[in-house]
Amino acid sequence: MSEVVQTKLGTATDAPGTRGPSAQSAAQGGTSPVKSVDGLGQPLPSAQARARAVLKLDAPTYDRALDCVHCGLCLPSCPTYAINGLEADSPRGRIYFMKGLADGRIAASAAVTRHLDLCLDCRACETACPSGVVYHELIEETRARLAAQRKLSLTDRLVDTLSFRVFPYPGRLRLALLGPRLLQKLKLWGWVMRMPLAGKLGKLRDMLPADGPVWEGRLQTFYPARAPDGQRRARVAFFAGCIGSVLFQDVNRQAIALLQRAGCDVLVPPAQGCCGAIHHHSGRPQEAMGLARRNLAAFLGEAAADPPSAADLPDFIVTAIAGCGAMLREYDHLLPSVAAAQVFARRVRDISEVLAELGLPAPQRSLALTATYHDACHLAHAQRVTEAPRSLLAGIPGLKLVPLPESDLCCGAAGTYNLSQPEMARDLGMRKIRMIQETGASVCITGNVGCAMQIQSEARRLGVALRVVHPVTLLHEAHFGGDSRRLSSSR
Ligand code: SF4
Ligand code: SF4
C-alpha cells in the first residue's frame, strides 16, 4: 500500500494519541486543520461541519459509531489488520474514519476510501466487540452513501458489470460460462489458464471450478420427504442462490437429498432470485431491496403483502450458501417496514442447523479422510453458526476432523472482494492455505461456495494438493455413497 492514513489512535506501532501531520493532511483531503479539539484530540464537529459532511449517516447508524469505545479488542480478529498491522485497516480505525466523514472533520480522500474499501465486511469485529458495535450496518451505509461520488476505471466497470448484471442472474451466468465450459470440455482451458491476465481478470479466470456441465439444469420445484422411518418432520423452502444454482447446483442437490432423508418436504420456489448480498455489500441498497422483495413474493406468495398464520408458511427457509443465508436473515433490517420481511427473516436457517435439529439417521458409509473445517465469515460471524456443521461432520464414521488455526479468519473471498481487492484477497488466501497445511489435512470443509472457490483457487495457484468441499458433500457421500468429488469445487 503506497499511501497510508493513520487515525488519531496511530498505526499498530504508534503510541495511542499520535497522528502524523502528513497523514492528517491526507485524511482531510488537503483541507486546513481544524483548531478546536475534544478530550481525545479530535476536532469538534460544528453544525456547519456536519452540514457539509460528505457522509450523511442515518441517526441510528451514527449512534452505533458512538458505541465504539476504542478498546481495540477487535483488532486481532480483523483480517486486514492481521495482514498489514495498520490501525487504519482495523475496525477501530475505520469507525474513526466513518465518524470523521460524518462529522465533516475529514474528506473522502482517495486514501480514506481505500482503507474503507479494503474492509471485507466479514463481521469478525462484531463477534469480538464487547460493546455490541453493529459494524456491518455502519460500513454498508457508508458505502451506499459514498458510492455515488466514485469514479470507476474501465476494469472496475467491467467487474461491476459482471458482479451486478451477470452473476445475480443464473440465465446470464449460464450463457457467460458457455465458452469457458466448452474450452474445459475440449481440454483447452489449461491454455487459457497459462495466459497472463491482469489482477482482477486473472482472478476471475482462476475462480472457475475445473469441472461442471456445459449448461447447468434447474432444480425441480418439489421433493418429497424420504426419511427411512417414513416420518415427515418439516416442510421447508429451499434457496438455491444465483451463483450457487449455476456453479454449485450439485451441492444444492446433495443438500435437498439430505433434507429429504431428514424427513423434509422440500419446496423450491421457481421465481426466486439473487439474495441481494453482492449489491448490499457494495453500496447498492435499492437494488438489494428490489431483489429482497422479489424473494419475499417467491417464497411467501400472497403472504408477502399480508403475512398469514404460521401454519401457511414453510417451517424453515433453508440455504446451503452461508453468504446468501446471512443476507436472507437481514431482510428484516433491509425492509424494516415490511411485515413479510420480518416473517421471512425469522425462518431462515443454514442447512447444517436444520439437519442438526431434525436429525439424520446414522450414515452407512465410512470416509477415511483427514479434514479440517474453515468457518465461513457469513456463517460464523454473521449467523453465529459454528457448532451445527461440526457436530454433523463428527457423526461421519472414519472422518478425522482436525482443528484449523485461525479457522474464523476470512479467506479473502467475501463476495466479489477477491475481484475488487485481489492483492489483499491473495494475501489472505495464502495465509489460509498455510494454516490448512499446518493441520496436515488433505480436505478443507467450508459452508460457503465463495470460500470454496477462493481456497481452491489459491491452493491450485500455490501448487498445494487440497480438496475443498461443502459439509453437505461429505454428508451426502457418507449417507448415499459414491465419490461426489466432481460435485465439489475440487480441481
Ligand atoms: S472492540 Fe468494539 S468498542 Fe472496541 S474498538 Fe473494536 S469496535 Fe470499538
Ligand atoms: S468487517 Fe472484517 S475486515 Fe472489516 S473491519 Fe471488521 S473485522 Fe476488519
Image (cartoon, rainbow, N blue to C red):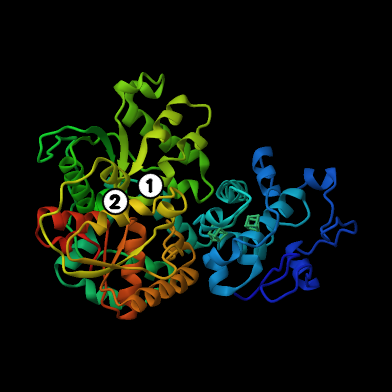
- Residue 141 marker: none
Q: Where residue 238 sits: x, y (%)?
A: 27, 39
Q: Where residue 54 sits: x, y (%)?
A: 71, 49
**SS at mark 2 in the image:** helix
Mark toward the start of the polypeptide (1 vs 2): 2
The correct choice, above or below, for 428 with respect to 397 in the image is below
Q: Nearer the viewer, residue 301 or 202?
A: 301
- Quadrant of the rendered image containing residue 151: bottom right
Q: Say whether residue 288 is left or right of residue 455.
A: right
Ligand 1 picture quarter: bottom right
Could you tell me if the residues under marks 1 and 2 are in contact, i.e. CB atoms within 8 Å?
Answer: yes
Instruction: Tell me if residue 278 can be seen.
Output: yes
Q: Where residue 443 sits: x, y (%)?
A: 26, 69
Q: How many marks?
A: 2
According to the image, label 1 marks what residue?
Answer: 324
Name the residue rendered at 45%, 30% in the picture. Answer: 342
**Numbered disc in front, either 1 or 2:** 1
Q: Where residue 460 sits: x, y (%)?
A: 30, 75
Name the residue rendered at 43%, 53% in the picture. Answer: 378
For the residues labelled 1 and 2, the Cα–Cα distance comes to 9 Å
Name the residue rendered at 59%, 74% in the picture. Answer: 1
- Residue 244 marker: 2
Q: Say whether residue 99 is left or right of residue 283.
A: right
Q: Nearer the viewer, residue 359 or 101?
A: 359
Task: Decide if ligand 2 comes within 8 Å of the CB at mark 2.
Answer: no
